[in-house]
Image (spheres, grey):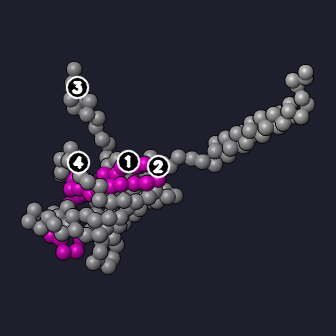
Amino acid sequence: MNHFNLKSLAFYGVAISSVLLLFKTVTAYGENNLKAPPLVSDRYRLTLAENLPNCEKSDTLTLNIEQSGIYLNGSVLPTNANADIDEKHSLIGILKNQQLNLSGKVNTSILCNIPQSQKDAFNSVTIQMQLVNTGVIPGQLTLNGIPQTLKFTAVPEKVQEKSQKSNSH
């Protein structure tokens, strides 16, 4: 009894070769064409070029961002807020071709430095930033009810590690 049939050996040889060729093709394509999106900083200090309309004084703001691939979640807080505040991310967006786009709702008291009594007023906000390799990133802010876009500069903040604060041996 002959266990080595020529047709069976040819079939298995072609099947194994096809799988190896497909694996090599897919791997080469992935290494050459697929790249991870750039890492976005966790915190940016936003400085508006001009005060917001109907605001006495616009504070410097902090933009907190969480990234998962090209998808972003963010929140805007006053810069003087406690860093440990766990603010719900009210902005969602995407990172595409070095362009960061976020939109959602932000509390008016955060934008205008208004007393707590008016804390329930919200504005629809769109934030756009062009990520470049320099330290200062230009951007624009669009608010509902305001016809012009407001220009700002964003500076990535260096987040100090908690271990430096708590462990001083």
**Circle nearer the N terminus (3, 2):** 2
| Secondary structure found at label 2 | loop
Which residue was labeled with disc 3? Answer: 167
Whether residue 162 is visible: yes
Which mark is on residue 6?
A: none
Q: Which residues are magenta?
A: 51-79
Report how far apart the C-alphas of labels 1 and 3 lie in the structure.
24 Å
- Residue type at mark 2? Gly
Residue 126: x and y in percent read 35, 67
| Secondary structure found at label 1 | loop
| Secondary structure found at label 3 | loop
Which residue was labeled with disc 1? Answer: 41
- Residue type at mark 4? Asp
Report how far apart the C-alphas of labels 4 and 3 lie in the structure.
23 Å
- Residue type at mark 1? Ser
Please identify the quarter of the rendering in which residue 73 is found.
Answer: bottom left
Of marks 4 and 3, the one in the foreground: 4
Q: Residue at x 22, y 68 (%)?
A: 122
| Secondary structure found at label 4 | loop
The image quadrant where one finds the N terminus is top right
The image quadrant where one finds the C terminus is top left
Which residue was labeled with disc 2? Answer: 69
88 relative to 53, above or below = above
